[in-house]
Image (cartoon, rainbow, N blue to C red):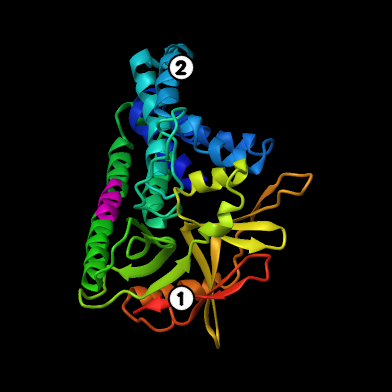
Protein backbone atom coordinates (compact mmCIF):
# COMPACT_ATOMS: atom_id res chain seq x y z
CA UNK A 1 0.00 0.00 0.00
CA UNK A 2 1.03 3.66 -0.19
CA UNK A 3 3.27 5.21 2.47
CA UNK A 4 0.52 7.36 4.01
CA UNK A 5 -1.64 4.30 4.63
CA UNK A 6 1.27 2.33 6.06
CA UNK A 7 2.22 5.15 8.43
CA UNK A 8 -1.40 5.69 9.50
CA UNK A 9 -1.95 1.99 10.19
CA UNK A 10 1.27 1.80 12.18
CA UNK A 11 0.22 4.88 14.16
CA UNK A 12 -3.13 3.31 15.06
CA UNK A 13 -1.37 0.12 16.14
CA UNK A 14 0.92 2.28 18.29
CA UNK A 15 -2.08 3.95 19.90
CA UNK A 16 -3.76 0.65 20.74
CA UNK A 17 -0.67 -1.16 22.04
CA UNK A 18 1.33 1.65 23.68
CA UNK A 19 -1.17 4.50 24.08
CA UNK A 20 -1.59 4.08 27.85
CA UNK A 21 2.17 4.01 28.35
CA UNK A 22 3.53 6.55 25.86
CA UNK A 23 0.55 8.76 25.11
CA UNK A 24 0.86 10.74 21.88
CA UNK A 25 4.39 9.46 21.36
CA UNK A 26 2.88 6.05 20.59
CA UNK A 27 1.47 7.55 17.40
CA UNK A 28 4.93 8.61 16.26
CA UNK A 29 6.55 5.31 17.17
CA UNK A 30 3.78 3.43 15.39
CA UNK A 31 4.09 5.54 12.24
CA UNK A 32 7.85 4.92 12.24
CA UNK A 33 7.63 1.16 12.57
CA UNK A 34 4.74 1.05 10.14
CA UNK A 35 6.97 2.67 7.50
CA UNK A 36 10.32 0.97 8.16
CA UNK A 37 9.73 -2.14 5.99
CA UNK A 38 9.66 0.06 2.89
CA UNK A 39 13.18 1.36 3.53
CA UNK A 40 14.21 -1.45 1.21
CA UNK A 41 13.33 1.03 -1.53
CA UNK A 42 16.56 2.88 -0.71
CA UNK A 43 18.53 -0.16 -1.87
CA UNK A 44 16.88 0.04 -5.27
CA UNK A 45 18.81 3.27 -5.95
CA UNK A 46 22.07 1.33 -5.99
CA UNK A 47 21.25 -1.93 -7.77
CA UNK A 48 20.28 -2.82 -11.35
CA UNK A 49 16.63 -2.65 -12.32
CA UNK A 50 16.21 -6.43 -12.38
CA UNK A 51 17.46 -6.61 -8.78
CA UNK A 52 14.88 -4.09 -7.61
CA UNK A 53 12.16 -6.55 -8.57
CA UNK A 54 13.62 -8.99 -6.04
CA UNK A 55 14.64 -6.47 -3.35
CA UNK A 56 11.50 -4.36 -2.89
CA UNK A 57 8.92 -6.13 -0.72
CA UNK A 58 11.40 -8.94 -0.33
CA UNK A 59 13.24 -9.92 2.86
CA UNK A 60 12.20 -6.71 4.67
CA UNK A 61 8.63 -8.03 4.45
CA UNK A 62 9.35 -11.60 5.49
CA UNK A 63 7.96 -13.47 8.49
CA UNK A 64 11.52 -14.46 9.39
CA UNK A 65 12.59 -10.82 9.72
CA UNK A 66 9.48 -9.90 11.73
CA UNK A 67 10.22 -12.71 14.18
CA UNK A 68 13.90 -11.76 14.41
CA UNK A 69 13.22 -8.05 14.97
CA UNK A 70 10.56 -8.77 17.58
CA UNK A 71 13.10 -10.83 19.53
CA UNK A 72 15.97 -8.33 19.08
CA UNK A 73 14.09 -5.10 19.82
CA UNK A 74 11.74 -6.08 22.64
CA UNK A 75 14.19 -5.56 25.51
CA UNK A 76 15.95 -2.44 24.12
CA UNK A 77 12.62 -0.72 23.52
CA UNK A 78 11.29 -1.74 26.93
CA UNK A 79 14.48 -0.30 28.47
CA UNK A 80 13.97 2.94 26.57
CA UNK A 81 10.38 3.11 27.83
CA UNK A 82 11.24 1.98 31.36
CA UNK A 83 9.83 5.14 32.97
CA UNK A 84 6.56 4.56 31.14
CA UNK A 85 6.44 0.98 32.49
CA UNK A 86 6.29 -0.67 29.08
CA UNK A 87 7.20 -4.34 29.48
CA UNK A 88 9.33 -6.33 27.02
CA UNK A 89 6.21 -8.35 26.19
CA UNK A 90 4.29 -5.21 25.25
CA UNK A 91 7.24 -3.89 23.25
CA UNK A 92 7.43 -7.21 21.41
CA UNK A 93 3.71 -7.07 20.67
CA UNK A 94 4.12 -3.56 19.31
CA UNK A 95 7.00 -4.46 16.98
CA UNK A 96 5.33 -7.58 15.63
CA UNK A 97 1.99 -5.86 15.01
CA UNK A 98 3.34 -2.59 13.59
CA UNK A 99 5.70 -4.40 11.21
CA UNK A 100 3.35 -7.30 10.57
CA UNK A 101 0.30 -5.21 9.64
CA UNK A 102 2.44 -3.34 7.11
CA UNK A 103 3.26 -6.66 5.48
CA UNK A 104 -0.35 -7.84 5.73
CA UNK A 105 -1.89 -4.96 3.82
CA UNK A 106 0.87 -5.19 1.21
CA UNK A 107 -0.27 -8.77 0.67
CA UNK A 108 -3.73 -7.42 -0.18
CA UNK A 109 -2.34 -5.75 -3.34
CA UNK A 110 -1.26 -7.33 -6.64
CA UNK A 111 2.42 -6.38 -6.41
CA UNK A 112 3.29 -9.46 -4.40
CA UNK A 113 5.05 -9.63 -1.03
CA UNK A 114 7.92 -11.88 0.01
CA UNK A 115 6.47 -13.14 3.28
CA UNK A 116 8.41 -16.38 2.83
CA UNK A 117 11.64 -14.71 1.72
CA UNK A 118 14.47 -15.71 1.40
CA UNK A 119 12.92 -19.00 0.29
CA UNK A 120 12.32 -19.09 -3.49
CA UNK A 121 8.95 -18.96 -5.17
CA UNK A 122 6.25 -16.52 -6.19
CA UNK A 123 5.36 -13.76 -3.79
CA UNK A 124 2.06 -13.76 -1.94
CA UNK A 125 -0.78 -11.49 -3.09
CA UNK A 126 -4.51 -11.65 -2.40
CA UNK A 127 -5.43 -9.04 -5.06
CA UNK A 128 -8.35 -7.62 -3.05
CA UNK A 129 -7.30 -3.96 -2.66
CA UNK A 130 -5.81 -1.37 -4.98
CA UNK A 131 -2.50 0.06 -3.82
CA UNK A 132 -4.26 3.34 -2.92
CA UNK A 133 -7.78 3.09 -1.54
CA UNK A 134 -9.10 6.18 0.30
CA UNK A 135 -11.98 4.31 1.94
CA UNK A 136 -9.48 2.03 3.67
CA UNK A 137 -7.11 4.85 4.64
CA UNK A 138 -9.47 7.62 5.81
CA UNK A 139 -10.71 5.87 9.00
CA UNK A 140 -7.08 5.30 10.01
CA UNK A 141 -6.24 8.97 9.49
CA UNK A 142 -9.29 9.96 11.55
CA UNK A 143 -8.02 7.79 14.41
CA UNK A 144 -4.61 9.47 14.22
CA UNK A 145 -6.10 12.97 14.25
CA UNK A 146 -8.31 12.16 17.23
CA UNK A 147 -5.32 10.70 19.07
CA UNK A 148 -3.28 13.84 18.55
CA UNK A 149 -5.89 15.86 20.44
CA UNK A 150 -6.05 13.56 23.46
CA UNK A 151 -4.36 15.13 26.49
CA UNK A 152 -1.39 13.30 28.06
CA UNK A 153 -3.16 12.49 31.35
CA UNK A 154 -6.22 11.17 29.54
CA UNK A 155 -4.18 8.55 27.67
CA UNK A 156 -3.59 6.67 30.92
CA UNK A 157 -7.35 6.44 31.35
CA UNK A 158 -7.65 4.87 27.92
CA UNK A 159 -9.17 7.88 26.22
CA UNK A 160 -8.56 7.73 22.49
CA UNK A 161 -8.22 3.96 22.45
CA UNK A 162 -11.90 3.38 21.81
CA UNK A 163 -11.96 5.71 18.79
CA UNK A 164 -8.77 4.07 17.46
CA UNK A 165 -10.34 0.63 17.83
CA UNK A 166 -13.53 1.74 16.09
CA UNK A 167 -11.66 3.35 13.19
CA UNK A 168 -9.45 0.31 12.77
CA UNK A 169 -12.57 -1.84 12.87
CA UNK A 170 -14.12 0.20 10.04
CA UNK A 171 -11.03 -0.31 7.89
CA UNK A 172 -11.06 -4.03 8.69
CA UNK A 173 -14.74 -4.20 7.76
CA UNK A 174 -13.88 -2.57 4.43
CA UNK A 175 -11.25 -5.24 3.83
CA UNK A 176 -13.91 -7.86 4.53
CA UNK A 177 -16.18 -6.19 1.96
CA UNK A 178 -13.35 -6.30 -0.57
CA UNK A 179 -13.08 -10.07 -0.19
CA UNK A 180 -16.85 -10.38 -0.61
CA UNK A 181 -16.76 -8.20 -3.74
CA UNK A 182 -13.85 -10.20 -5.15
CA UNK A 183 -15.71 -13.46 -4.55
CA UNK A 184 -18.90 -12.14 -6.18
CA UNK A 185 -17.03 -10.88 -9.21
CA UNK A 186 -15.00 -14.08 -9.46
CA UNK A 187 -18.20 -16.14 -9.51
CA UNK A 188 -19.66 -13.99 -12.28
CA UNK A 189 -16.48 -14.21 -14.35
CA UNK A 190 -16.35 -17.98 -13.93
CA UNK A 191 -19.98 -18.22 -15.05
CA UNK A 192 -19.30 -16.05 -18.12
CA UNK A 193 -16.37 -18.22 -19.19
CA UNK A 194 -18.39 -21.39 -18.59
CA UNK A 195 -21.25 -20.12 -20.79
CA UNK A 196 -18.74 -19.51 -23.56
CA UNK A 197 -17.19 -22.95 -23.11
CA UNK A 198 -13.76 -21.35 -22.71
CA UNK A 199 -10.94 -23.41 -21.26
CA UNK A 200 -8.09 -21.65 -19.50
CA UNK A 201 -5.04 -22.32 -17.36
CA UNK A 202 -5.70 -19.80 -14.58
CA UNK A 203 -7.27 -16.43 -13.94
CA UNK A 204 -7.11 -13.56 -11.48
CA UNK A 205 -9.28 -10.61 -10.46
CA UNK A 206 -8.15 -7.32 -8.92
CA UNK A 207 -9.91 -4.01 -8.20
CA UNK A 208 -9.49 -0.97 -10.41
CA UNK A 209 -8.03 2.24 -8.90
CA UNK A 210 -9.38 3.58 -5.61
CA UNK A 211 -12.41 1.28 -5.17
CA UNK A 212 -13.71 -2.26 -4.67
CA UNK A 213 -16.79 -1.90 -6.90
CA UNK A 214 -15.22 -2.25 -10.35
CA UNK A 215 -12.88 -5.16 -11.04
CA UNK A 216 -10.47 -6.18 -13.77
CA UNK A 217 -9.94 -9.84 -14.67
CA UNK A 218 -7.13 -11.62 -16.49
CA UNK A 219 -7.52 -15.06 -18.03
CA UNK A 220 -4.44 -17.06 -19.01
CA UNK A 221 -4.97 -19.08 -22.19
CA UNK A 222 -2.49 -20.78 -24.52
CA UNK A 223 -0.57 -18.01 -26.27
CA UNK A 224 -2.85 -15.18 -25.10
CA UNK A 225 -4.24 -13.28 -22.12
CA UNK A 226 -7.85 -12.12 -21.96
CA UNK A 227 -8.70 -8.85 -20.19
CA UNK A 228 -12.23 -8.17 -18.96
CA UNK A 229 -14.05 -5.83 -16.57
CA UNK A 230 -16.90 -6.48 -14.18
CA UNK A 231 -18.82 -4.19 -11.84
CA UNK A 232 -20.59 -5.61 -8.81
CA UNK A 233 -23.65 -3.74 -10.14
CA UNK A 234 -23.63 -5.62 -13.45
CA UNK A 235 -26.58 -7.92 -14.01
CA UNK A 236 -25.88 -11.65 -14.02
CA UNK A 237 -26.90 -11.85 -17.71
CA UNK A 238 -24.54 -9.10 -18.88
CA UNK A 239 -21.72 -10.70 -20.92
CA UNK A 240 -18.15 -9.60 -20.30
CA UNK A 241 -16.31 -8.01 -23.19
CA UNK A 242 -13.01 -9.85 -23.35
CA UNK A 243 -10.05 -8.09 -24.96
CA UNK A 244 -7.46 -10.57 -26.26
CA UNK A 245 -3.73 -9.82 -26.03
CA UNK A 246 -1.12 -12.10 -27.58
CA UNK A 247 1.63 -13.08 -25.11
CA UNK A 248 4.46 -12.95 -27.61
CA UNK A 249 6.09 -16.07 -26.23
CA UNK A 250 8.06 -16.66 -29.44
CA UNK A 251 9.56 -13.19 -29.14
CA UNK A 252 10.51 -13.63 -25.48
CA UNK A 253 12.04 -17.01 -26.29
CA UNK A 254 14.82 -15.26 -28.22
CA UNK A 255 15.96 -13.74 -24.92
CA UNK A 256 15.25 -16.76 -22.75
CA UNK A 257 18.78 -16.89 -21.30
CA UNK A 258 18.80 -13.25 -20.15
CA UNK A 259 18.62 -12.95 -16.36
CA UNK A 260 16.82 -9.61 -16.62
CA UNK A 261 14.03 -11.11 -18.72
CA UNK A 262 13.73 -14.02 -16.30
CA UNK A 263 13.39 -11.54 -13.42
CA UNK A 264 10.46 -9.77 -15.13
CA UNK A 265 8.78 -13.07 -15.91
CA UNK A 266 9.20 -14.18 -12.28
CA UNK A 267 8.03 -10.86 -10.87
CA UNK A 268 4.92 -10.80 -13.07
CA UNK A 269 3.94 -14.32 -11.99
CA UNK A 270 3.73 -15.19 -15.66
CA UNK A 271 1.28 -12.39 -16.54
CA UNK A 272 3.74 -10.77 -18.97
CA UNK A 273 3.57 -9.98 -22.66
CA UNK A 274 6.53 -9.38 -24.97
CA UNK A 275 7.02 -7.43 -28.19
CA UNK A 276 9.96 -6.51 -30.40
CA UNK A 277 11.26 -2.99 -29.97
CA UNK A 278 13.91 -0.85 -31.59
CA UNK A 279 16.12 -1.44 -28.55
CA UNK A 280 15.58 -5.17 -28.20
CA UNK A 281 12.61 -6.39 -26.18
CA UNK A 282 9.52 -4.66 -24.77
CA UNK A 283 7.90 -6.32 -21.73
CA UNK A 284 4.73 -5.48 -19.81
CA UNK A 285 3.20 -6.91 -16.64
CA UNK A 286 -0.55 -6.97 -17.23
CA UNK A 287 -1.49 -7.44 -13.55
CA UNK A 288 -1.28 -3.70 -12.94
CA UNK A 289 -3.80 -2.58 -15.52
CA UNK A 290 -3.42 0.06 -18.17
CA UNK A 291 -3.92 3.74 -18.73
CA UNK A 292 -6.68 4.63 -21.19
CA UNK A 293 -7.21 7.36 -23.75
CA UNK A 294 -10.12 7.80 -26.12
CA UNK A 295 -10.26 9.21 -29.63
CA UNK A 296 -12.37 8.69 -32.75
CA UNK A 297 -10.75 5.28 -33.31
CA UNK A 298 -11.71 3.87 -29.91
CA UNK A 299 -9.69 3.40 -26.74
CA UNK A 300 -5.90 3.26 -26.55
CA UNK A 301 -4.46 1.08 -23.77
CA UNK A 302 -1.04 1.75 -22.26
CA UNK A 303 0.14 -0.97 -19.84
CA UNK A 304 1.20 0.51 -16.51
CA UNK A 305 4.27 -1.62 -15.69
CA UNK A 306 6.57 -1.65 -18.72
CA UNK A 307 10.25 -2.41 -19.31
CA UNK A 308 12.58 -2.47 -22.28
CA UNK A 309 15.49 -4.88 -22.37
CA UNK A 310 18.48 -3.82 -24.45
CA UNK A 311 21.28 -6.42 -24.39
CA UNK A 312 23.69 -4.17 -26.29
CA UNK A 313 23.80 -1.22 -23.89
CA UNK A 314 26.76 -0.54 -21.63
CA UNK A 315 24.39 0.62 -18.90
CA UNK A 316 21.63 -1.27 -17.10
CA UNK A 317 20.13 -3.44 -19.88
CA UNK A 318 16.68 -3.42 -18.25
CA UNK A 319 14.90 -0.08 -18.09
CA UNK A 320 11.53 0.45 -16.44
CA UNK A 321 9.39 3.18 -17.95
CA UNK A 322 7.49 5.63 -15.81
CA UNK A 323 3.72 5.66 -15.54
CA UNK A 324 2.13 8.14 -17.92
CA UNK A 325 -0.67 10.11 -16.20
CA UNK A 326 -2.18 11.39 -19.46
CA UNK A 327 -5.95 11.15 -19.64
CA UNK A 328 -6.32 10.09 -15.99
CA UNK A 329 -9.24 12.41 -15.19
CA UNK A 330 -11.22 11.34 -18.25
CA UNK A 331 -10.47 7.70 -17.50
CA UNK A 332 -11.77 8.02 -13.93
CA UNK A 333 -14.99 9.68 -15.15
CA UNK A 334 -15.59 6.95 -17.69
CA UNK A 335 -14.72 4.29 -15.12
CA UNK A 336 -17.38 5.72 -12.82
CA UNK A 337 -19.98 5.54 -15.58
CA UNK A 338 -18.96 2.00 -16.48
CA UNK A 339 -19.09 1.02 -12.82
CA UNK A 340 -22.71 2.11 -12.62
CA UNK A 341 -23.68 -0.02 -15.62
CA UNK A 342 -23.10 2.21 -18.64
CA UNK A 343 -21.06 0.04 -21.03
CA UNK A 344 -20.46 2.91 -23.44
CA UNK A 345 -17.00 3.27 -24.90
CA UNK A 346 -15.00 1.79 -22.03
CA UNK A 347 -13.91 -1.19 -24.12
CA UNK A 348 -14.79 -0.24 -27.71
CA UNK A 349 -12.20 -0.85 -30.44
CA UNK A 350 -9.22 -1.31 -28.12
CA UNK A 351 -5.66 -0.96 -29.31
CA UNK A 352 -2.46 -1.26 -27.30
CA UNK A 353 0.15 1.48 -27.34
CA UNK A 354 3.73 0.80 -26.28
CA UNK A 355 5.25 3.54 -24.12
CA UNK A 356 8.19 5.27 -25.87
CA UNK A 357 7.74 2.95 -28.84
CA UNK A 358 6.10 3.05 -32.21
CA UNK A 359 3.96 0.13 -31.13
CA UNK A 360 0.27 0.23 -31.94
CA UNK A 361 -1.61 -3.01 -31.99
CA UNK A 362 -5.34 -3.43 -32.51
CA UNK A 363 -6.77 -6.06 -30.20
CA UNK A 364 -9.57 -8.53 -30.97
CA UNK A 365 -12.56 -8.86 -28.63
CA UNK A 366 -15.08 -11.50 -27.62
CA UNK A 367 -18.42 -9.93 -26.67
Quarter location, residue 201: bottom left
> Is 11 left or right of 293, judged from the image as shown?
left
Is 174 covered by the magenta stretch?
Answer: yes
Q: Position of residue 230 (x, y in %)?
A: 32, 69
Residue 190 or residue 74, whichever sits in front = 190
> Is 155 left or right of 247, judged from the image as shown?
left
Quarter location, residue 188: bottom left
User: What residue is shown at x 33% (from left), y 37% (from top)?
Assistant: 160
Q: Which residue is mark 1?
A: 333
The overriding secondary structure of the stretch rendered in magenta is helix
Is 84 covered by the magenta stretch?
Answer: no
Q: Is residue 223 above or below residue 122?
A: below
Q: Secondary structure at mark 1?
A: helix
User: What residue is shown at x 34% (from left), y 81% (from top)?
Assistant: 342
Residue 274 or residue 112, whichever sits in front = 274
Q: Is residue 260 above or below residue 234?
A: above
Residue 203 or residue 214, whichever sits in front = 203
Q: Position of residue 40 (x, y in %)?
A: 57, 34
Q: Position of residue 178 (x, y in %)?
A: 29, 55
Q: Which residue is mark 2?
A: 73
The stretch in magenta equals 172-179
Where residue 266 is drawn, which disc sits there? none
Q: In the rendered picture of this protein, how many numbered marks are placed on residues?
A: 2
Sequence-earlier tag: 2 or 1: 2
Q: Position of residue 191 (x, y in %)?
A: 21, 67
User: What residue is shown at x 67% (from left), y 36% (from top)?
Assistant: 47
Q: Is residue 87 visible?
A: no
How packed mark 1 is, by other alpha carbons closer than 10 Å (few <14, some 14-19, many 20 or more), is few
Q: Is residue 186 visible?
A: yes
Amino acid sequence: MDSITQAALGAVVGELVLGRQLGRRAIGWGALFGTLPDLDAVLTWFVPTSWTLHVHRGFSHSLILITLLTWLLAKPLAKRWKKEKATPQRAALFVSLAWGTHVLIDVFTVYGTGVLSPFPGYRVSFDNLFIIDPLFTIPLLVAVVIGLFVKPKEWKKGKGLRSAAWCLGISCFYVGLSFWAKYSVSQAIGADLARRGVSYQRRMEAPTPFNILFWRALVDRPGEIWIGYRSIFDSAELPIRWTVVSKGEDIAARYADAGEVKSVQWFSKGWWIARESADGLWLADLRFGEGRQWDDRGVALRPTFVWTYNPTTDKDPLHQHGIEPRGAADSLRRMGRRMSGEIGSWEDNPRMIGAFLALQEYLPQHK
